[in-house]
Image (cartoon, helix red, strand yellow):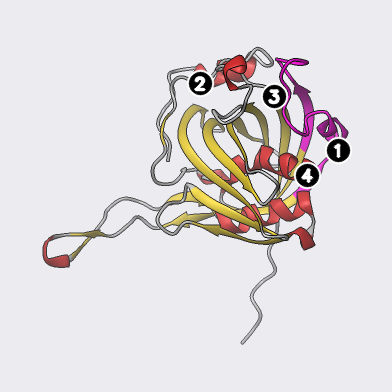
Amino acid sequence: MRAICSFCLIVLFLLGWSGNAAAGELSEHLANFPQWEKLTSVQSASGDLAYQEWMAGTWKVTSTLVDLVAPLAPDVMTPGFESNRQQLNKPVSFIVRFIKQPPPVKVGLKFIPQINNKSPILVADRAFNSLNLAKAYLGDQAVLSVKVDPDSPNRQITFLRGERQLVSIVTARATETISNNQFITAEVFQQLFKGGTLPYFNSVESTTAYHKLPTNNPKIDADQVTAVYLSPQDPDYFQAGSRPVALYRYRLEFFPVELPPPAEQ
């Protein structure tokens, strides 16, 4: 369960269209760490999260936990918080990729396809990315597969050995564009871990600021804060209210991966 909690904390940035946040709210959100208030400008998640064009391709991501705070300690703590201190300043690496997604084909009267003039958007390859992330945190033998709901990119299940499952559902999002080289995303999701003695629920809010760098080593870095909130099923829910019970800050570094040329036929 401790390893599962660590894996859950950064899975969000791999899920993936977003509403625009109120001007500056996401920037202010990050600047105020660890004084954290629940986001108010997020909108219901629909469709997929569109990333900036400079994130296209395959990347080796190095994620490092650089700070963690339990705002309501010692009265209210989340499972695994203290053990997660062992992850401080210990980088974890995995491969991810971002791909172009063609616009959906509209169907007109009498089921006649109509041309969609919208350009393709850049999205995360969710199943590929989440599988690599899970294996990096839990080990190759612990993870069986990742399945994304074919009807919604915002729902996925990670299947683990021992008939365990982690169900992740993105419920709300917002984005904020700072410049051509910087943008921020915020996502809220519900997660359910099934397979233990009792199912475990919680709500997570993750805010990530991506920054394109002038170098290739790394080419992109990101500052990510993940806030954990109790679900209504938790006995301490009313005591915690709308306040987070755990905050985790990560540094993400993206290094471009050169893919080998295709084999000759």
State the residue at coordinates (72%, 61%): 161
Q: Which residue appears farthest toward the left when viewing the image?
A: 109
State the residue at coordinates (78%, 34%): 80
How far apart are the alpha carbons under marks 1 and 3? Answer: 19 Å
- In the rendered structure, the answer to whether residue 109 lies left or right of residue 77 reads left
Closer to us: 163 or 149: 163
Which residue is tagged 4? 3
- Mark 1 / mark 3, whichever is N-terminal: 1
Disc number placed over residue 246 in the picture, else none: 3
Disc number placed over residue 39 in the picture, else none: 2
Question: Could you tell me the amino acid type at mark 3?
Answer: Ala
Q: Secondary structure at mark 2?
A: loop
How far apart are the alpha carbons under marks 4 and 2? Answer: 27 Å
Mark 2 neighbour density, 10 Å: few (under 14) some (14–19) many (20 or more): some
Report the span colored magenta.
Answer: 64-93
Whether residue 206 can be seen here: no
How far apart are the alpha carbons under marks 1 and 4? Answer: 14 Å
Q: Secondary structure at mark 4?
A: helix
Judged by depth in the image, the label closer to the viewer, 4 or 2, is: 4
Mark 1 neighbour density, 10 Å: few (under 14) some (14–19) many (20 or more): few
Judged by depth in the image, the label closer to the viewer, 1 or 4, is: 4
Which residue is tagged 1? 90
Quarter holding the N terminus is top right
How far apart are the alpha carbons under marks 1 and 2? Answer: 29 Å
- In the rendered structure, the answer to whether residue 38 lies left or right of residue 135 reads left
- Mark 1 / mark 2, whichever is N-terminal: 2
Question: Could you tell me the amino acid type at mark 2?
Answer: Leu
State the residue at coordinates (82%, 41%): 91
Mark 4 neighbour density, 10 Å: few (under 14) some (14–19) many (20 or more): some
Judged by depth in the image, the label closer to the viewer, 1 or 2, is: 2
* Residue 81 shown in magenta: yes
* Residue 79 shown in magenta: yes
